[in-house]
Image (tube, helix red, strand yellow):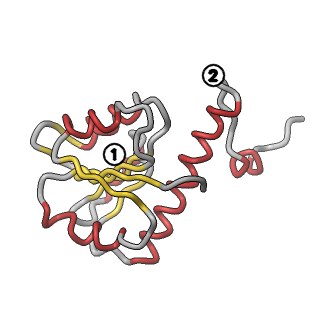
């Protein structure tokens, strides 16, 4: 990883993200906060948007899906991780099927969260590097190329 990783925590309730914020301390992630979709949209519209977005499901002016839609329009790849209030398999499937990178719920176990962050960062960095390697051309990250079936 080159440079510092940045993340936005999109949430309206401070209490609900306190554990996540604490778990992210010491992970070399520069954190910013957005209280709603509009603030998240401004941060994601920058030339250098954050690498990661952690968003709660419901916000005062929208939902996680609105945050994800905005992230998909960012000038560079961004991975969105939805933070649920509890285990909900149907919500997890909805989130994952609609393009979120992952879904996490409290309590945040440091090792588990570190794994999610590492995977999300590796993925987004590979995608960003692919865009700078050949502008307008997307190359698959090496990890995906290794898993591809041989051409016959």
Say which of marks 1 and 2 sits in front: 2
| Mark 1 residue crowding within 10 angstroms, few (<14) / some (14–19) / many (20+) | few
The answer to whether the residues at label 1 and label 2 have Cβ atoms under 8 Å apart is: no
> Disc 1 and disc 2: Cα gap in Å?
30 Å
- Residue 41: where, in percent of width, then height? 27, 34
What is the residue that sits farthest to the right in this orientation?
152
Snapshot quadrant of residue 112: bottom left
Identify whether 22 is placed above or below 145: below
**Nearer-the-camera pick, 58 or 93:** 58
Identify whether 120 is placed above or below 71: below
* Residue drawn where x is 45% and y is 42% of the image: 78
* Residue drawn where x is 37% and y is 53% of the image: 7
- Residue 88: where, in percent of width, then height? 27, 60
From the viewer's perspective, tell me whether residue 91 is left or right of residue 129.
Answer: left
Q: Secondary structure at mark 2?
A: loop
Rendered-image quadrant of the N terminus: bottom right
Identify whether 59 is placed above or below 85: above
* Residue drawn where x is 24% and y is 52% of the image: 33
The residue wearing badge 2 is 136
- Residue 119: where, in percent of width, then height? 54, 59
What is the residue that sits farthest to the top in this orientation?
136
From the viewer's perspective, tell me whether residue 84 is left or right of residue 135.
Answer: left
The residue wearing badge 1 is 94
| Residue 28 visible (yes or no) | yes
From the viewer's perspective, tell me whether residue 28 is left or right of residue 126.
Answer: left
Q: Secondary structure at mark 1?
A: helix
- Residue 42: where, in percent of width, then height? 27, 33
Rendered-image quadrant of the C terminus: top right
Instruction: Give the number of callouts.
Output: 2
């Amino acid at each position: 990883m080159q440079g510092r990783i940045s993340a936005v925590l999109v949430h309206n309730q401070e209490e609900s993200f306190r554990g996540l914020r604490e778990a992210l301390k010491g992970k070399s992630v520069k954190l910013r906060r957005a209280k709603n979709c509009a603030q998240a949209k401004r941060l994601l519209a920058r030339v250098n948007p954050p690498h990661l977005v952690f968003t709660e499901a419901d916000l005062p002016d929208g939902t996680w899906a609105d945050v994800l839609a905005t992230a998909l329009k960012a000038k560079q790849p961004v991975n969105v991780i939805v933070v649920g209030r509890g285990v909900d398999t149907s919500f997890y499937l909805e989130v994952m099927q609609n393009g979120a990178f992952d879904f996490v719920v409290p309590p945040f176990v440091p090792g588990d969260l570190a794994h999610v962050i590492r995977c999300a960062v590796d993925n987004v960095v590979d995608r960003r590097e692919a865009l700078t390697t050949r502008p307008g051309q997307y190359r698959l990250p090496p990890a995906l190329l290794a898993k591809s079936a041989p051409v016959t």
